Amino acid sequence: MSPSERAAEALAHLERFKVFSEIYAVRQFQLVLCVDAFNLAVEDTMRVLESAVEAERMNGGFNYLSCEPLIISEMRSRHTRRFDDQVGAKGEGVISTCAL
């Protein structure tokens, strides 16, 4: 990723993390972040997410949580889900979120 792409990605994560804190103020949950990617993209996408979470942690962004965010991944092969040929067809990962 180029520096401008990394900055845009970091900003997107920052906005998501801000929303989580607002939701948590209303209802507590355990934050679970899931990388949903094709087998070849899982490791790279996990590193991107782990880096974003670490940056947010270093800035005190998760201080409101009662426990650390959990990062998981779902490895899959192409066309295991409907519309796989339209989303992530180039092998990039998708980061999903789930609040439990």
Image: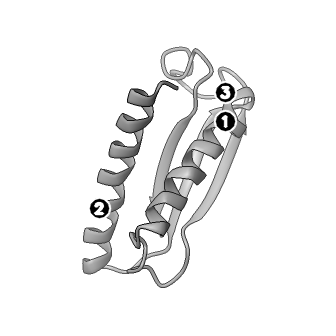
Q: Residue at x 67, y 36 (%)?
A: 44
Report, in whole angstroms, how far the alpha carbon at label 2 lies from the one at label 3.
32 Å
Give the left or right position of residue 38, taking residue 89 as reference.
right
Q: Residue at x 49, y 74 (%)?
A: 30
Cβ atoms under marks 2 and 3 closer than 8 Å: no
Rendered image quadrant of residue 99: bottom left
Give the mark toward the camera: 3 or 1.
Answer: 1
- Seen from the viewer's position, the closer of residues 100 and 52 is 52
The label on residue 18 is 2
The label on residue 44 is 1
Report, in whole angstroms, how far the alpha carbon at label 3 lies from the one at label 1.
20 Å
Earlier residue among tags 1 and 2? 2
In the rendered view, tell whether residue 16 sits above or below residue 3: below
Give the left or right position of residue 45, taking residue 59 as reference.
right
Earlier residue among tags 3 and 1? 1
Give the mark toward the camera: 2 or 3.
Answer: 2
Under circle 2, the secondary element is helix
In the rendered view, tell whether residue 15 sits above or below residue 58: above
Under circle 1, the secondary element is helix
In the rendered view, tell whether residue 79 sits above or below residue 9: above
In the rendered view, tell whether residue 39 sits above or below residue 87: below
The image's colour scheme reads: one colour
Q: Horizontal and vertical percent for residue 98? A: 47, 58
Mark 1: give few (<14), some (14-19) or many (20+) Cα within 10 Å.
Answer: some
Residue bearing mark 3: 80
Earlier residue among tags 2 and 3? 2
